[in-house]
Amino acid sequence: MGKRNMRWVILMLLGTVVGCSSVNKSDSSLVEAALNYKPQAMENYVLGAGDVVQINVWRNPDLSGEVKIRPDGKLSSPLVGDVKAAGLTPEQLSKEVRDRIATYVREPQVSVIVMATESYAFRNRVRVTGAVEKPLSIAYTEGMNVLDLLLSAGGLNDFADGNDAVLYRQYEGQTVVIPVRADDLLSRGDVSSNYRMLPGDILTIPEKAL
């Protein structure tokens, strides 16, 4: 193979690598909608395995008490037996319990209070992966932003292509890919992409193309 042909092949391969290193970003209108999205309020909290709830049946202390949702997503309660709780809101669970004990208790009044949100802490972590000093997964904290996450990860490593970073966010059943200029944020103080983090967000820093 001649030198000219060899050079052409190398350039083609480099072009392929560079092309593959970039992730397609989402449509700008979708990105804006995802950035303005606010997660559901605590009153709409969805129960999960590991959560502890207080079931109160009015005037029936024997039917009331704290119970932990098992790994199979179910809990056990007097007169109720096993009931699927994971995936329900506290209000939906209280209705399920009320319907089940209505055979034994006349016009029961049931309330469910969330006492411990173990599943929330796992399902709503934030993560940073790729070319950072310490890839990590940490519990979401209200007010956390991109800069907080990058600093927690020790910053970018020597191989990072920080200005081609992306933030993955779940929004209305789809994954939105949001561009983040992490290098400008850290080295120039450009806060234009210092977005607030939301539970479940994943920040990914790619490596520079060779």
Image (cartoon, grey):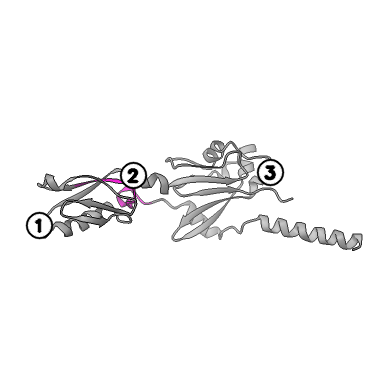
Cα separation between marks 2 and 3: 38 Å
Query: In front here: 198 or 79?
Result: 79
Confirm whether the magenta stretch covers residue 44.
yes
Q: Which label number is shown at residue 117?
A: 2
Q: In the image, what residue occupies the spot 63% across and 40% down? A: 156
Instruction: Looking at this view, name the residue that lies furthest to the right.
Output: 2
Query: In front here: 192 or 209?
Result: 209
- In what element is the residue under mark 1? loop
Report x, y in % for residue 21: 67, 55
The nearer-to-camera label among 1 and 3 is 1
Q: Which label number is shown at residue 180?
A: none
Report x, y in % for residue 89: 29, 54
Circle nearer the N terminus (2, 3): 2
- In what element is the residue under mark 3? loop
Confirm whether the magenta stretch covers residue 115.
no
On screen, residue 148 versus residue 94, left or right, reads: right
Decide: is 133 above or below 105. above
On screen, residue 68 versus residue 101, left or right, reads: right
Q: Which label number is shown at residue 104?
A: 1
Label 3 Cα crowd, 10 Å radius (few <14 / some 14-19 / many 20+): some
Q: Amino acid at mark 3?
A: Phe
Circle nearer the N terminus (1, 3): 1
User: Tags 2 and 3 in contact by the CB under 8 Å rule?
Assistant: no
Q: Amino acid at mark 1?
A: Tyr
Q: In the image, what residue occupies the spot 55% across and 58% down? A: 28
Per the image, the residue denoted by label 3 is 159
Circle nearer the N terminus (1, 2): 1
Q: Amino acid at mark 2?
A: Thr
Q: In the image, what residue occupies the spot 44% across and 61% down? A: 173
Q: Which residues are magenta?
A: 40-55
Cα separation between marks 1 and 2: 30 Å
